[in-house]
Amino acid sequence: MKRALFTTLGLAAFVFAAAASAAPATFVFNTSGFNLADYTATTGYIGFAMDGSAVQVNLASSASTSAIPAITLWVPGSTTNSMGQTVYPGVADLGDVTVTGNGGQTTGFTVLHENVSLDAVVNAYVQALQGIGFTSAEQSSPTDNLVIYTFTNNGTELRAVFHREGVNVSAHLQGAASA
């Protein structure tokens, strides 16, 4: 009886520890290479790095940061809040970049790559994420206009959905708990 109880408790502790170590992946944005004060439509580039357990998304005005196809970044002008203070735009305010979050953490983002092939976008993201230590696995897709990948790196799992929309391709990366 005691052995069964300890075995059950041990198994429960193992499952709990495994579940606790698989935290949802998050993203942090580094905009040091991009001018958030330039309020015109600007060509932007994305690169990746690891920042602890989070994936760092580097936004830059220079193609030297990444081989990922360019995106158009539109920065809205500054605004004034109810207390009369000037509020400058941040990543969540950028046109053509959609950021999703949960509990104050960025858990995903979507960008649009214009006038580029689906294969070019997919290959660039796969190479960029593999370059920072992720392994990739293509998943089955219901249509030729979608390509789905999972990327894993030391308990961090990302799901990427690439969607061809005419001559444009949207790339959506979402952090997920590792299975």
Image (cartoon, rainbow, N blue to C red):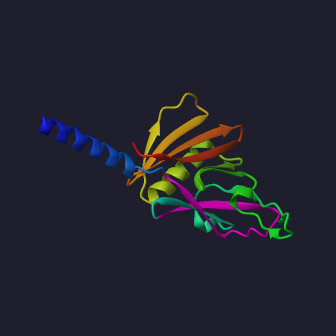
Q: Nearer the viewer, residue 160 or 156?
A: 156
Give the left or right position of residue 161, taking residue 87 as reference. left
Q: Which of the 4 image quadrants contains residue 39?
A: bottom right
Can you say whether 67 is above or below 160 in the image? below
Q: Nearer the viewer, residue 54 or 150?
A: 54
Q: Magenta region: which residues?
A: 25-51
Give the left or right position of residue 169, taking residue 125 as reference. right
Can you say whether 43 is above or below 139 in the image? below
Q: Is residue 59 magenta?
A: no
Expressed as whole percent of the image width and height from the top left, the position of residue 62 reads: 66, 68
Expressed as whole percent of the image width and height from the top left, the position of residue 113 reads: 68, 49
Q: Which of the 4 image quadrants contains residue 172?
A: top right
Expressed as whole percent of the image width and height from the top left, the position of residue 130 reads: 45, 55
Expressed as whole percent of the image width and height from the top left, the position of residue 132 reads: 45, 60
Number of numbered discs on residues: 0
Locate the C terminus by quadrant. Answer: top left
Q: Is residue 46 magenta?
A: yes
Q: Which of the 4 image quadrants contains residue 143?
A: top right
Give the left or right position of residue 102, taking residue 52 as reference. right
The residue located at (43%, 54%) in the rendering is: 134
The residue located at (54%, 44%) in the rendering is: 160
Locate the N terminus by quadrant. Answer: top left
**Could you tell me what secondary structure mostly forms the magenta stretch?**
strand
The residue located at (49%, 42%) in the rendering is: 149
Residue with the most extreme top position: 142
Give the left or right position of residue 108, taking residue 132 as reference. right
